[in-house]
Structures are given as structure tokens and as C-alpha cells.
Image (cartoon, coloured by chain):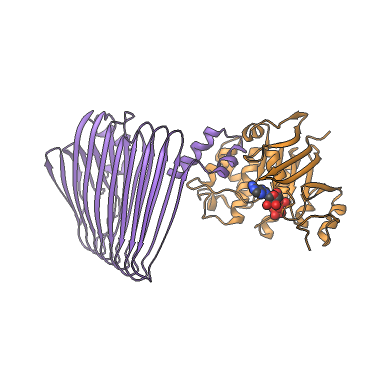
Amino acid sequence: MGILEVKNLSLSINGSKILNGLSVSFQEGHIHAVVGPNGAGKTTLGYTIMGLEGYRDFTGDIIYKGKSIKNLSVYERARKNITLAWQEPARFEGLTVEDFIKSSAKNKSRETVTDVLEKVGMSPGEYINRAVDKGLSGGERKRIEFASILVMEPELVILDEPDSGIDVASLNNMFKAIKFLKSNGTTVILITHSLAVLKQAEDAFLLCHGDIIQSGSIDKVSVYFKGKCIPCDHKNLPE
Amino acid sequence: MSVEELVKAANIYPEMHDKDTARLVINKDKVIDTNVVTGLTVNTVEIKDGVDINIVLKENVTIEKPVHLCFGVTHREAIQKIIMNINIGQNSIVSIFAHCIFPNAVDVKHVMDGKIKVGRGAKYSYFERHIHSEEGGITVIPKARIILEDYAKFKTEFELIKGRVGSIDIDYETTCGNHSVMEMITRISGRGDDIVNVKEAGILVGEKAKGVLTSRIALRQNARAQVYNKLVAMGDYARGHVDCQEIIQGNAVASAIPIVEVRNPKAHITHEASIGSVDSKQLQTLMARRLSETEAVELIVAGLLK
Ligand SMILES: Nc1ncnc2c1ncn2[C@@H]1O[C@H](COP(=O)(O)OP(=O)(O)OP(=O)(O)O)[C@@H](O)[C@H]1O
Ligand SMILES: [Mg+2]
């Protein structure tokens, strides 16, 4: 049994079915990848696991460490050490990088903040007092988000397209940090389109039209990246 | 309450007492401390229920350290009228930190009537922090008319986030000359039955005049706010922006009335407003980091008001 079991999950938004009786099992301490075309439902799956607003009304179940978390709020799931990094992180006017990171940190010292900024390849001197607002680039914001995940010391984390907007040098920092999470026993779910990110995982799931249609080794699933998705009737098949 | 306690409540930097820091401290209608520096003249006349202040900065003078003004009322019940004329000479530079402190107010009315002229090429910034009692028995009526001559730069920030607002009625209007730059910022946090009225206007008369009006209001319980922001662009290539954000919780009610008026096809004004509850993505991000909803809202509001 996995640390997180998603069972027969179906979710509709505004009458259209986004997740379609999906079942998947994530193993404790593993790095899993979830791949699939645009609009397949990857982000929706992440939001539903996290229990975000608007993603609570579904059929099926989500079992974490043997117990259903279906009826828990976002905050209650976070207190069970589950967290999520958004595909596009929110911006906070007036909140400094330090305030933002500290708010998630178990240990709220300044050293924790400087240490984690270095882990994501950002100079603390340059960033610690900046605001987490429009003044940060998309890639910088993603890395700050990731830093706030690291200080949270989660047991399970969903990283939605962690590489989007990240330059090559920073990507290596990000990969190192993902390995660091794993070394601490964190279960990592990587949602991605990128082969480089996929390679960081130990196994992968291919999500198409709201359901997992293939799973297994990276090599097997990366067939998707070779240009053709496994035949299915998805309306948004990648060319 | 002594001057020291007043100053302490305002969290004023110790530099305020330096020999080379200009200052003026008023309690109700009495001037209790002054210090001036070269180039700066401060004349005060005690009037009925207040003080008439005349501040003149000569031309081509740079005042290195911020000038401190402290307008306090330590009484429980009082009226304080401040009439303030400020004249900043051409090409001079100065900033003022003003602290308005009403720590014991049960029924206090503070009226400020300012006339400010910022000379050609001069730079003037004014920061006003209010510290009120927890009673809410305060009425604050600040009014200012500001004139910016060509190439002048002016920035004013009004902050009322400590203690209850009571009732506030801000009325500022700035007229901007050629190539002048104006920025007016207001940050207010209201609760209980506080009433916040903000009326800020910028008239961009001159060519290439620039103006930004920024309002950040957070309301809880039964507080009410109305923000009336007006920008008028008349000069060629005048540019302006109105940015109003109000976060409400509980039974609070907020409204925003942005008026942008462009009378010159070469001018341009934009405005953005967001009124309502805390942004859901921000809230959920923090909740996904183990913050409770209350903790998350507090952090977001603190950021907004900073
Ligand atoms: N709140 C919503 N309202 C309406 N439709 C939604 C909403 N959220 C998701 N959808 C729809 O659900 C489908 C799946 O979206 P989702 O964001 O999960 O896809 P994704 O696999 O993450 O895609 P991408 O690779 O582009 O990030 C899309 O068709 C999307 O338009
Ligand atoms: Mg997505």
C-alpha cells in the first residue's frame, strides 16, 4: 500500500468531467512523475489531493497513510505534512521573501531562510528583503515558492511544473533540492512536460483525459515525449 | 503623558533628538519642543485650539536628516487644529516624518489644514503616521492643497494602522506642473465601527506630469470605507495611475470610486482596483504551508498595509 492512494477519483467542474475515475498509488519516499498533454488534468489532480477550494466536491477517495483525507481542509492536510507548489505561484504585496519563507518554516530563524535561499541558488543578500510581488520574475517567484516548500519539511509534496520559467543553472539547483527532499524521506510528485524533470523521477504516470492510462518506468512512459501519446481519444492530443 | 512617552509611542528614531535634526513637537495647542537647522525656518503661532505653522525651506538647500513633526494630544477630550503652510524653495530637498499620536483619546478631533508649495526642481517627501487609542473616539480631518511647480517631486504617505481609526476624512489635492512627479499613498486599517473616507485627487496640468494614487485599506468587523480617487490629465504626455486595494472581512463595507479624466489625446491614465476578501490563491498558498485561515489572512493584510 502506498503512502497516498487515490481511488476512483471523479471530479467535474462546471458540468464537464475533468478527472475520470482515476486511481493511482504513490509510494512513500519515492519521486514520482505525472506527465500528460495540456488539459489532461494533472494540475487538477494536484489541487484535489491538496484539497484546494473548488476541488473538494468529487467522488472516490483519497487515502493518506491509511486514512481518508477527503473531508480535511487544505490547512488540515498541510498539518499532515502534505503540500503543493503551484504551477504559477501567487504574489504577495508587501510580504518580504524572509516573511514568506519564515511563515512556512518549522524553524523560523534567519539562518533557515539564508540556507534555503542558497539551496535554490538565490543570493540571500540580494533577495531576502525583496517583496514577493510583481517585482520578482516568474522564475524567481518559482524558486522562492520552492524554498518555502523546503523549509516546511513536508512528507509529501506536489510540485506542479517545477521547471517552468527556470533557467538551466537554477534547474540543477532545483534537481539537487528534489534529491535533498528525497533524502529526508519526502514523497515527491513531479507534474511535468519536461524530459529533464521526468528523469529525476523513479517512475511515472501518464495522465490523459482525466485518467491514468499508463504507468511504470521512466523509459516506458517517456514514449509520450517521443512525439506520440499512447493512442486515446483525447481532444488535445499533442502533435 | 510626557513628551518622551509620546515620542516612544510613535516609535520615533532616537536621531530625532540630535542637534542637527529639525523638529517640532506639539501637544494639543502648545508647542513643547522645537529645533531648526540651517536653511529651514519654522514659525509657530499658538491659536485657539491649535497651532498655525509656517515652514519655509530656502532655495538650493538639502536637509540631510528627515525633519520630525510630532502632533500629539495626550488629553482624553480635545480639539487640535493644525494649520500648516509649507514652502519648499527651488531645487531644495527635504523629507518630513510626521507622527500624530492620540493615545488616550475618547473624544478628540484633529483637524489639519495644509497648503504646500514645492518649488521648481525641488524634492519633498512627507510621511505621516497616526497612532490612535483603542477607544475609537477620534475624528481626523486632514486636508491639503499641494502645488508642484515644474520638475518638482512630491511623495506623501499616510499610515493609520495602529489603534482604532475612529472616523477619518482625508482630502488631498495636488496640482502638478510640467515634468513634475506626484505620488500619494494611503494605508489604513479599520475595525469596530470605524469610518474611513479618502478623497485624493491629482490634476496633471503640466506637460509630462506624472501622478500615482495608491490606496491600501483593510477593514474588519463593521468598519466602512469609501475611497474616492481622481486623476485628471491635461498636459501633453501626462501619465497617471490609480491603484486601490481594499480587503474586507466580517461585516465591513468598502467602496471605491475611481475617476480618471483625460482631456488631452496625448495623455494616458490607467486604474486598477480590487475590493473584497483576501485573494484566494494567496490564502490557499499559506494554508498549504500549515497556516490557519486566520493566520494566513493576518499575514496577507499585514503585507498589504506595509
Ligand atoms: N476551475 C476550472 N474551471 C473550468 N475548467 C477547469 C478548471 N480547472 C481546470 N479546468 C479544465 O480542466 C482541464 C484540466 O486542466 P488542468 O489544469 O488540470 O490540466 P493540466 O494537465 O495541468 O494541463 P497543463 O499541462 O496545461 O498545465 C482543462 O480542460 C481545464 O480547462
Ligand atoms: Mg497544469
Locate residue B266 relative to residue B89 in the image: left or right. right
> Which chain is depicted purple?
B
Residue B48: % across, % down: 11, 39
Name the residue nearer the viewer: B211 or B101: B211
What is the number of callouts on the image? 0
The image quarter in which residue B217 lies: top left
Q: Is residue A149 visible?
A: yes
Quadrant location of the C terminus of chain A in the rendered image: bottom right
The quadrant holding residue A8 is top right
Q: Is residue A193 left or right of residue B80?
A: right
Give the farthest residue toward the front.
Answer: A15
- Which chain is orange in the rendering? A
Give residue B71's position: percent from left, percent from top: 24, 40
With respect to residue A147, does B121 lie above or below? below
In the rendered image of this protein, does residue B88 appear above or below residue B305?
below
Residue B170, image x, y percentages? 29, 46
**The N terminus of chain A lies in quadrant:** top right
Q: Nearer the viewer, residue A89 or B31?
A: A89
- Going 57% across and 36% down the picture, which residue do you hit? A108
* In this rendering, position of residue B295 left or right of residue B40: right
> Residue A197: percent from the left, percent from the top?
75, 53
Please state if B24 lies on the left or on the right of A118 as rendered. left
Residue B13 in view: no
Q: Residue at x 60, y 35 (%)?
A: A107
Q: Nearer the viewer, residue A230 or B294?
A: A230
Pick whichever, B128 or B90, lies toward us.
B128
Q: Residue at 57% across / 57% down in the picture?
A: A137
